[in-house]
Amino acid sequence: MAADTGVPNAGRLSAIVPEPGVRKPDPLLVMDQVTRTFGGLVAVRVEHLEVQRGAITALIGPNGAGKTTLFNVVSGFDRADGGRWSFDGQRLTGAPAHRVARRGLVRTFQLTRTLARLTVLENMLLAAPGQRGERALPALLRPLWHGQERELERRADELLDRFRLGPLRDDHAGTLSGGQRKLLELARALMTRPVMLLLDEPMAGVNPALTQSLLGHITQLRDEGLTVCFVEHDMDVVMGISDWVAVMADGHLVAEGPPHTISRNAAVVDAYLGKRHDEPQATGQKEKGNGEEKGNGEEKEE
């Protein structure tokens, strides 16, 4: 655990030099030489990346940069071609998704994965780990698991109320709106009592009012000590709640830093607009100059 310095971990990032692969004061997730290829395509090649404990880190980059693939690898939903990573000081390289989740590293998906034919409450209870009633012999003896089940249901109701889904607890998950399913997936992730959340585009397809609600929930989770790393394309969201931003392009980590420095970073501008992004303006100026010269020539001829 982090040493008690009297300074929140997120605040300790302000003293760090913003550069790719920079060391953090109290990293929770550490990646080294992580690579993932698909045929001849290098989807991810991250030399070194650390995620600060107790902070909100945004992972951004243009489409195809490798952000979701990196999430898939470290969360156990995909296998890396090389590299290593650790979580809370323990090696996690190559661990399957269920073991990763048991360690406290839990993720959500851009496309929500609710079980449509189960109720909202049943979706929540399904996520709770270590349920005695799921094992064959204890399941036959109700006193062994009934008390635990009541406790889990109480916790599920608390989370549903927190995300304003309490009145929908007995509705089928398939009847929820897209935004409500996002909330359910976040609430369900919390049923596992995670140490860190990986959120893949949590605001995608969510209306502005619900976006503000989600932002409030995420910052509150950070304030309660949870570590959050999220992929997002909305720069207003990134600048609004992030303590730190990591930028990927073509599978590589090209920049890191506080939100206010990222928009001015040349590597970030190049990643989004291309290294020769100023050519159209230069060409336009040249054409304008040619036109003026031609116009002047025509006036002389007249």
Image (cartoon, rainbow, N blue to C red):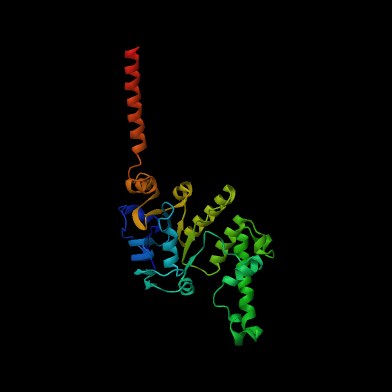
Which quarter of the figure has residue 6? bottom left
Considering the image in quadrants, where does the N terminus appear? bottom left
- Return the x and y of residue 58 as percentages of the image width and height: 43, 55
Q: Is residue 121 visible?
A: yes
Considering the image in quadrants, where does the C terminus appear? top left
Which residue sits at x=44%, y=63%? Answer: 71
Q: Could you tell whether 149 is left or right of 240 in the image?
A: right
Compared with 114, 247 (above or below) is above
- Return the x and y of residue 191 as percentages of the image width and height: 56, 68
Quick one: which residue is furthest to the top in this view? 302
Which quarter of the figure has residue 67? bottom left
Q: Could you tell whether 194 is left or right of 164 in the image?
A: left
- Return the x and y of residue 258 as percentages of the image width and height: 37, 50
Q: Nearer the viewer, residue 117 or 294?
A: 294
Which residue sits at x=40%, y=73%? Answer: 94
Compared with 274, 126 (above or below) is below
Compared with 277, 55 (above or below) is below
Q: Could you tell whether 24 is left or right of 159 in the image?
A: left
Q: Is residue 43 visible?
A: no
Q: How many marks?
A: 0
Q: Nearer the viewer, residue 45 or 32?
A: 45
Q: Nearer the viewer, residue 25 or 210?
A: 210
- Return the x and y of residue 204 as percentages of the image width and height: 53, 53
Q: Nearer the viewer, residue 267 or 182?
A: 267
